[in-house]
Structures are given as C-alpha cells and as structure tokens.
Amino acid sequence: MIAEIGHFSLILALFVALFQAVFPLIGAARGNRAWMGVAEPASFAQFLLVATSFGALTWCYVASDFSVLNVAQNSHTDKPMLYKIAGVWANHEGSMLLWIFILGLYGAAVSWLGGNLPPALRARALSVQAMIAVGFILFILFTSNPFLRLDPVPANGEGLNPLLQDPGLAFHPPFLYLGYVGFSMAFSFAIAALIEGRVDAAWARWVRPWTLAAWCFLTLGIGLGSWWAYYTLGWGGWWYWDPVENASFMPWLAGTALVHSLIVVERRDTLKAWTVLLAIVSFSFSLLGTFLVRSGVLTSVHSFASDPTRGVFILALLAAVTGGSMALFFLRAPRLKSGGLFAPVSREGSLVLNNVLLSSAAGVVLLGTLYPLFMDVLDLGKISVGPPFFNAVFVPLMVPVVFLMALGTQMSWKRGNLTLALRQLKVAGVAALAALLLTWAMSRSLGASAAMGLATWLFVGTISNLFNRLKPSRLSLSEVWRRAAGVPLSFYGMILAHAGLALVIVGITGSTAWKTEKIQVMHSGDTINVAGYDLAFKGVEEGVKGPNYIAARATFTASKNGKFIADLKPEKRMYEMPPRPTTNAAIHTSAFGDLYAVIGDPNESGGYVTRLYYNPLVPWIFIGAGVVALGGLVSLGDRRYRVGVPSHKVNPKNPVHA
Amino acid sequence: MTLRRNFVCVCAVALVLLGLQGAAFAVQPDEMLANPQLESRARVLSEGLRCPVCQNQSIDDSDADLAHDLRVIVRQRLQSGDTDAQVKQYLVDRYGDYVLLEPPFKTSTLVLWLGAPLILLAALGVALVFYRRRQETSEDTQRPLSAEEQKKIAALMDPQDDGRKGTL
C-alpha cells in the first residue's frame, strides 16, 4: 500500500511538474501575472508529492518491506537503522528518487524565499526547474522504478554491500546530490535570463547564494567521499582520479569558477555571457556525472551497448539539456551587453584569470575522463588514462591558481597596482621562501618543497589580507573590533575558503611525499618501527560479534620513545548478508599525521600479514576541505546575499552601467 | 571472479563516487624482493601499471589474482636485469597500451596529450578577445561629450538649480 502511494505520488508529481513547466513560461511571455503565479503553488505541490514518494520508499526500507523489489535487493532486517535508511539512496533507483526530491526541495525554496525576485524571472526559472523534474521523473518511472513489487516475497533481503555500511558513505550521497542538483538553480536562472535577454548585477545577487550553497554541499560531499575512501579502502589513498571521482570533480571545478565569475557580474556588470555559460556548463557536468556513473558506460562501452535503456535515456536528457541550452545561449548571448570596465591587472582581472585556469582544469579532466571511451567507440584501441596523466596536466594548472589566489585578493577593484599588491605580500613571500628552504633541508624533495612554499604563500598571504583590513598592529582594540564588525561576511568567507585550501595542499604534499609504509608478516609480540612510532602486535581476537558481521580484531600498541600513545584495533570483518569481507583500518590521528594499521590474512606459521602506515599531515586534507566549505557557508550569511533581504532594486529605466 | 563482479555491482550501485575499489590487500609480504632497491623500483613500476581486469586500479592497489601475477612478473623481470622501460614494454607487448596508466604519446593519443595545453590556450584566447572588445567599447565611451550633453551637465551643476530640472 505504502509503495503504491509512493508510486502514485510520483506520477502525480510528473503532471504537476508538466503544468509548472508550461503555464508560468507562457504567462511570463505574455506578461500574465496569474499564469506566472501558478509556479509558486505548483512548486510546493511538486515538492510535497516527491517528498511523499521519497518518504514512502524510506518507510518501505525502515519497515523492511521485502515485497518491494528494491528493498529486497538492497536491505536486510539485521542492518542497523542508519544503514536501512542510507540504503534508500545506496542503489540506483532510490538515488534517482533522492535526486528529484532534492530538485523539488530547491524549487520550493525558490518559491518560499524568492519573494523579492522579479515575477517573470521567478516564473521562468521555476518553469525550467520543472522541465528538469519532468525529464528525471520520466526516467524513474520508465527505467528505474523503485516501487516495483516482488512475488513471492522473500523471507529476508539480500543486504547492502558492506563497503557502503559506513557513516561517511551514508551521508556522502545526499551532500553530493545537494551539490549536483543545486547547480540546477544556477542553470534555471541562467536559462530564464537568456529567455529574458537580461543579466545584471541584481541577477548575479540572486543566483550567487544558490550557487554558493550548492558549491558548499558539493565540497562537503567530495570531502566526505574522499575521507571514506581513505579510511575504508585500507591503504591510505584518498584520491584516485577514478572516472567516478572525476564525475564529481568536474562540476566542482566549473562551480568554483562560477562562484567567482558571479562576483564580477555583481560588481562590474560585465562577464555576463561567460557567467551564464558557466552556469549551463556546471549543471551539464552534474548531468554528465550522473550519466557516467549510472549508465555503466565506464565499466565497458560494450556492456553499455548491450543494455542501453537507462544510459540512452540519460544521454538523451543530457543532450536535450546541454544542446537546448547551448542553442539558446548562442542565440541570446550576443544580446547581453557588458557594462563596467576594468584593467587586466585588477581584482576583476585576477578573477578572469582564475576562471581561465579553473575552466581549463575542468576541460582537461573531462578530456582525460572521456578519451578512453572515445577511443574505444572509434575502435582506435584501448588505453587507460590514470593518475600519472591527470597529475601531469592538472598540477601545472593549479600552481598559478594558488599563486594568484594570494595575489589577486590583494588587488584593488577596477585598476590594481601589482607593485603595491606584491609589497603587501612581503611577509607571505618571506614565509614561503622559509617554508621552501626548510622543507628542502628536511626532505631534499623539490616537488614537496615547492608545494609547501606555495601553500605557505597562500596561507600567510590570505591571513595578511585580513590583517591589512583590520590593522591590529596599528589601531586600538576597540577600533579593530569596530572594523572587524564592518567587514562583510563574504570577505571572511573568502579568507576561510582560501586558507582552507592551503591546508588541503599541505595535507596532500605530506601524504604524497613522506608516507611511510611497512608490509610484513607479524607474530604476536613482534614490534615494528614506523616513522618513529613503535607498534607492538598483541595478537588477534577471533569471532568478535558486530550487529551483522563477525570480526577478527587485532591489537597494536603504539608508543614513541617508550611512552604509550594509543591502542590500535584494526578489524577484518565478514558480513553475514551479503557474505563479503571488509578490512577496517585503525587510525590514530594527531596534528602531524595518522598512524594507520590494517590487519590481513593469517599464514601457516600463525603470523598475520600486517600493513602499517604513517601518513603525515593527511588529516589536514579533510580539515582543510571542511574549512573551505565553512568559508562558503560564512559567505552565504553575507547580508547582501541573504535571501529575503530587500536588495537595492535596479531601476529598470536607469540600469547601472558604470 | 565474483569479487570483480561484486565490484562492478558496487560501482553501478553507488552514485557514490569515490573509487569503490573494495577493501584490498594488494602487495603481499611473500611477493616482495629482498633487495630494497629492486623492490622500491617494482613498487613505483606497479603503481603505473593497470590491473587489466579491474576498474581503474593499479596492480599495486588491486587484490585481483591477475594483479598478483603481474606484480610477480614485474619483480622477475627486474631480477633478471631488465630496465624499467623494458619491464613496461614486456607487459605492453602482452596486454597492449591498456596496461599503462600513463597513456603513451603517439598518434592516437595526440589529442589527449596536446589537449591540455590547447584548452588552456583557447581559454586564454577567449580572455584576450574579451579584453580587446572591452578596449574598443571603452574608446567608444570615451568620446567627448556632445553640445547637448554639455548643456545638461551645466544645468545639473548649476548651483541655483535644485537638480530636478536636468535629467540624464
């Protein structure tokens, strides 16, 4: 019954979305307020219906209703409640339902918070939003229905892949989708603006908070996924340039460029066509990511060709969205007149360079991800494009980005002074040089020294930017406080996000350059020294019972110079349903790095294969990613972007053309 | 190969990005060479070699049987005195370019390797065109004011006028 309610709600949502896609658009074209106005209740209705549908599937999972095929295939009564719920989106059909649930959520949020939007713009944006919903609901109903029944009903479910039974991965998909789908907002507003033929500072001010929110979620989603890979997969890697990872990284790169180019549109009323294009591209990347992961095309082009229903549907959706919006773009973009001027050496100028480099990076990742597919399809032979390629092309693009991040933010708007900006970065330059030399003295690694120097340049440069603004060394405390309160939140957001990236770079450098690895067979009582830590193997306790697995749990006692540090208890688990083994690393984290222990199989002599690592500075990758996302969040709190705050309405008769 | 099949399922299942390679136990102690120099060369080599039956995993990371066999072959070749390039060539002769995680530079990969600098150049070109056009429009807006505009300004600046008379 519940499943049928979910199914039925979804069908109703389709009709509501169709209605919402058509009437507000016609209303906006005719200037008919009433027709435009239906977008608002329609978006609420669509959200409620999709939420009901999503809630129904969640209910089926919580209640372990195995008469529903999707639940039977992906759940089990013994699973802890968290993973029963996470099981909803840990499979194809359920995750698509989550996709449109979030789409509906964003649509309703526009209606709820967007009271100050011009009615035509809002009507058109909501209509575009509904068109996307129509496409995806059709996709679910025709190719990926999660509400199909099963007869006869099995006694229990097949369970969830144990790798997915993890808190990091339980929350990773919702965050990722909040990011992916969030870019649909920028997309819908971009299409609405193209239809109207008008993009102005006010438009940028409306679009930026949505884009920023999506970007924060995507940052968190990618960070969570990377963290999960790090502690789950058992050898301390955190990024593999896997096509599935790239699928989420491309929208992130394009979205990062978009968040920055929107600043220029808002400030200078220029770079409009480019920004609209980026909004289209960011969302297209999100769709492409969905296609790459969903269609099976990555596993093999041929397996895709043999069962192409889903893949072809998403490909068609991708072609319609990207092709349609690109056609509209080339038709209308020439109409977008640019306003304000700025010199290439200025804050805007460095944002332009940021966009050049970030979009090139997104393009390069796209090229590397799709190239093997194209070669295979065109029968040019099978090749692999792996980490060595991506590192070789991506890192050279990121070095100037990081260098400019410290420099560009010191420049003044419109016309900057390079000498003045560099003078303000004196401290950062000295600190960077010191970090470079210190790293060289310690490691003799050129790459690591350069990276540490660059990270210091960015970190100190960013902090000194804050100092220049507040001048704590020259002014009285109360004056500094007064200034600090007057600085807009978006400035603090920028400081946090940029400093956070510096931390990420430090972590990446540490883990790549100075990782220590010891692989050996150990017997109870053996001690191995890893990067100055003594790890004493105390043996393995077999048959430790978990909620739905049995584990072999090893104990290592870590000490440094005879002083006890911590006990590490890595496990090898055998899950009951599905019967699959996992290795669960034990990690002891300190500010300087992670002690990372994994236990393997026993051998004939009663010893165990053990893998012990010291991963220097790795925690800073994930802390840094969190700080970056926090920066976005703080920026979102800025008065100017707070949705609902009356913005300075642009006088239509006298638009701001500086 | 149930493991691989399961792995493929996981990938299909998960939207869920991050390299669902499956908890693995790659290099085993009994595979490792006694000579630390050779062993470290073997590790570097195997990080750049793809496990042909896995999804985007190096033989160093993979726990597939074939990856194990290849790790052993790499070490045997090194022990018999092969250079790193010879070891790679040995595997390419048997498994094709597919086994290299860094694609070789040749006609069919020309677009891939030259693509990166070309994309950057194209993006820089777009920025350049943007600045050029801006300059043209700025020259356009910097033309001297017409007589009528001068009059309007004068009216606006007139201290006796409260400013409402002249509208721009």
Image: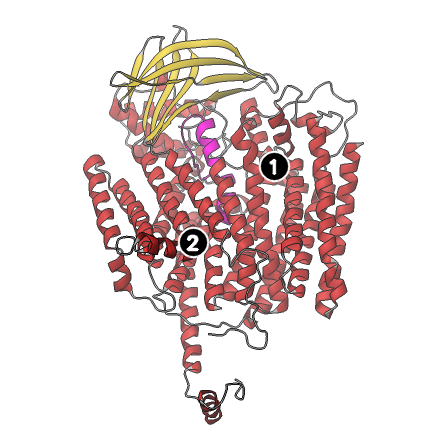
Q: What amino acid does circle 2 point to?
A: Leu
Q: Which mark is residue A314?
A: none
Q: Residues within 10 Å of mark 2 (few under 14, many from 20)?
A: many
Asked whether the viewer can see residue A400, the reply is no
**Disc 2 versus disc 1: nearer the observer:** 2
Q: Position of residue A109 (x, y in %)?
A: 64, 51
Chain assignment, label 2: A
**Tag 2 near tag 1, CB within 8 Å:** no
Q: Magenta includes A248?
A: yes
B67 to the left or right of A69: left
A601 to the left or right of A18: left
Q: Position of residue B132 (x, y in %)?
A: 40, 73
Q: Which residue is mark 1?
A: A303
Quarter placement of the N terminus of chain A: top right
Q: Residue furthest right?
A: A1
Q: Which residue is mark 2?
A: A358
Using the image as rendered, state which of residue A523 and residue A111 is in the foreground: A111
**Residue A607 position (above or below residue A657):** above
What's the magenta region? A225-252
Distance between the alpha carbons at the discs numbered 2 and 1:
33 Å
Q: Magenta includes A106?
A: no
Using the image as rendered, state which of residue B51 and residue A469 is in the foreground: A469
- Main SS of residues in magenta: helix
A56 to the left or right of A656: right
**Residue at image location 41% in from the left, 81% down from the top:** B139
**Residue at image location 38% in from the left, 56% down from the top:** A482
Which tag, 2 or 1, sits closer to the chain's start? 1
Q: Position of residue B109 (x, y in %)?
A: 43, 48
**Residue A477 position (above or below residue B25):** below
Q: Position of residue A186 (x, y in %)?
A: 57, 56
A151 to the left or right of A332: right
* Residue A127, picture quadrant: bottom right
